[in-house]
């Protein structure tokens, strides 16, 4: 797996407002997709802040983790021949107050929609994702206390 991240803010830092944010970045993944990222605006030093034109890099880490675990949960349920029709996961997090501002707590609340799915199957799928399959969750679990909850909606 590879990814190239390029600073897109050089022209903005030089005073060219048309170029976007002075702290903008574009990631190009090995699969050929692009993702834009930007820093938070800094009122005290605008040249050091972003323009809020895209997600923050750490937001993309959190989003990627949610995508990784939701993918696992859906796949595990489908492989178990459950009639899963929807899955969302809302992640809330806390970060350390000092640098490096790693994630210290992450809570993931899953909402799974389907027909005739037992709560135990959803609970098992979430546990399997977090204990065995989701690389992102397992990696972030080295610094963060990760908790989960879920609700099951009959469709």
Image: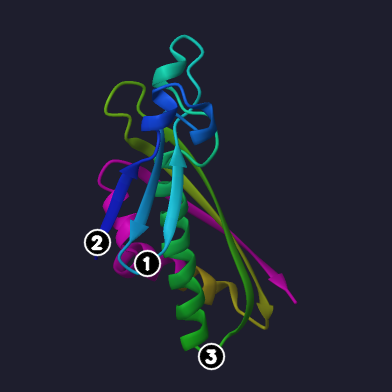
**Spot occupied by residue 73 in the image (x, y as percentages of width and height):** 48, 71
Q: Quadrant of the N terminus?
A: bottom left
Say which element carries label 2.
loop
Asked which secondary structure carries label 3, the reply is loop
Q: Residues within 10 Å of mark 2 (few under 14, many from 20)?
A: few
Q: Mark 1 or mark 3: which is in front?
A: 1
What residue is shown at x 40% (from left), y 66% (from top)? 127
Q: CA distance from mark 3 to mark 2?
A: 34 Å
For this rendering, which residue is in front, 77 or 116?
77
Label 2 sits on residue:
2
Can you tell which mark lies on residue 32?
1
Task: Identify the mark at residue 54; answer none if there is no mark.
Answer: none
Q: Is residue 144 magenta?
A: yes
Task: Name the image quarter holding the C terminus.
Answer: bottom right
CA–CA distance between discs 2 and 1? 10 Å
Range drawn in magenta: 126-155
Using the numbered discs, state the Cα–Cα distance from disc 1 to disc 3 in whole angstroms: 32 Å
| Disc number lying in front (3 or 2) | 2
- Taking depth in this image into account, of 98 and 150 the one nearest to the observer is 98
Compared with 37, 31 (above or below) is below
Instruction: Assess whether residue 149 is covered by the magenta stretch.
Output: yes
Reading the image, the residue beneath label 3 is: 81
- Quadrant of the rendered image containing residue 32: bottom left
């Amino acid at each position: 797996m590879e990814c190239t991240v390029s600073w897109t803010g050089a022209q903005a830092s030089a005073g060219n407002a048309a170029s976007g944010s002075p702290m903008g970045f574009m990631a190009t993944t090995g699969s050929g997709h692009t993702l834009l990222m930007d820093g938070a605006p800094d009122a005290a030093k605008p040249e050091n802040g972003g323009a809020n034109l895209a997600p923050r890099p750490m937001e993309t880490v959190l989003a990627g983790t949610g995508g990784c675990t939701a993918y696992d949960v859906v796949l595990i349920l489908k492989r178990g021949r459950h009639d899963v029709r929807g899955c969302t996961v809302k992640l809330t997090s806390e970060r350390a107050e000092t640098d490096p501002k790693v994630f210290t707590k992450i809570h993931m609340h899953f909402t799974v929609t389907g027909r005739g799915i037992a709560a135990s199957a959803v609970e098992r799928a979430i546990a399997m994702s977090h204990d065995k399959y989701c690389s992102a969750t397992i990696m972030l679990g080295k610094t963060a206390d990760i908790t989960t909850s879920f609700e099951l909606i009959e469709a």
